[in-house]
Structures are given as structure tokens and as C-alpha cells.
Image (tube, rainbow, N blue to C red):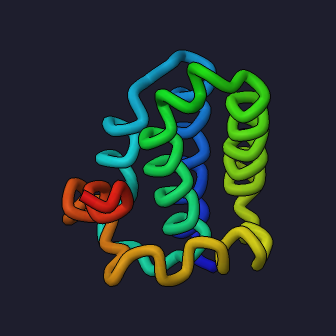
Amino acid sequence: MSSADIDNRKLVADLIRKVLIFGAPAREAVLRFPKDTKDRSILAAYHALVHFEADEELRARDLLYKEEQDDYLEFISNTLDRGEDLPDNIIKSYDGFYETASVPKGFWQSFLKFLNI
């Protein structure tokens, strides 16, 4: 893995932290993801943030769900910050979610597809 790949993972980790700690909009964070990456860990983090954004109403109603989702994103952030790959089960859980995983190119189309609109 190149130093640029590790830098991209650290960038994504920082973006996730800003969403969790400072309440930065997830929508803005995904728009700042590395463009056209092939890194499956970054792609999984992208999809996790899209999912986070889509769950806004559920998170407001179900505090246990909110806490579990926050812990999940924190784990993703910490793993990427160390420059490590996300576990295979996390990566595989997002395989096939989208026809293309171009980040952030096509974000709104992917987001609407995720919401089944």
C-alpha cells in the first residue's frame, strides 16, 4: 500500500470523526472522499456514511440504534486512521450495493438508489 493510499484512509477517518464528533453533515463528508478510489475499505466507509445519512429519522427515534451505528462508524474511522484494511465482513456487506462505487462521482444517484427512489 502506498503512502497516498494511507493518506486517503486517514482523510476518510478524519471526515467520519467530524461527522460523529462535530455533527458535520455526512453528505458533505462523502463529497470530500477521494475520487475514483479502488480501495475497498474506503468504498465501504463511503457506503456506511451514505447509510448513516439515510437513517437520520431512525436514529432520532431509536437511541440504541444510533449508539450502535455511531460505534460502528467510530470503529471504521479508527481502523482507517491506522492505515489498516477494514475487516472482510464489513467490506463484503457493501459489495453489490451499487452498480458502481465511484466516490463521490454519482453520489446523488447512488444515494437515491440506496433509498429505492
Q: Is residue 15 above or below residue 46?
A: above
Q: Position of residue 54 (x, y in %)?
A: 43, 42
* The image quarter in which residue 88 lies: bottom right
Note whether residue 7 is visible: no
Answer with left or right where residue 117 lies relative to residue 56.
Answer: left
Query: Residue sitting at 31 percent across and 72 percent down?
Result: 102
* In the foreground, 55 or 27: 55
Answer with left or right where residue 112 lies relative to residue 46.
Answer: left
Answer with left or right where residue 72 lies relative to residue 39.
Answer: right
User: Which part of the image, by quadrant, shows the N terminus?
Assistant: bottom right
User: Which part of the image, by quadrant, shows the C terminus?
Assistant: bottom left
Q: Position of residue 59 (x, y in %)?
A: 59, 28
Note whether residue 6 is visible: yes
* In the foreground, 5 or 116: 116
* The image quarter in which residue 2 lies: bottom right
Query: Residue sitting at 46 percent across and 74 percent down?
Result: 97
Query: Residue sitting at 70 percent across and 52 percent down?
Result: 76
Q: Position of residue 112 (x, y in %)?
A: 26, 56
Q: Is residue 64 above or below residue 53?
A: above
* The image quarter in which residue 9 lies: bottom right
* In the foreground, 78 or 108: 108
Q: Is residue 78 above or below residue 91?
A: above
Query: Residue sitting at 67 percent across and 44 percent down?
Result: 73
Q: Is residue 22 above or below residue 2?
A: above
Q: Position of residue 74 (x, y in %)?
A: 73, 40
Q: Count the marks: how many?
A: 0
Answer with left or right where residue 50 lies relative to residue 88.
Answer: left
* In the foreground, 46 or 53: 53
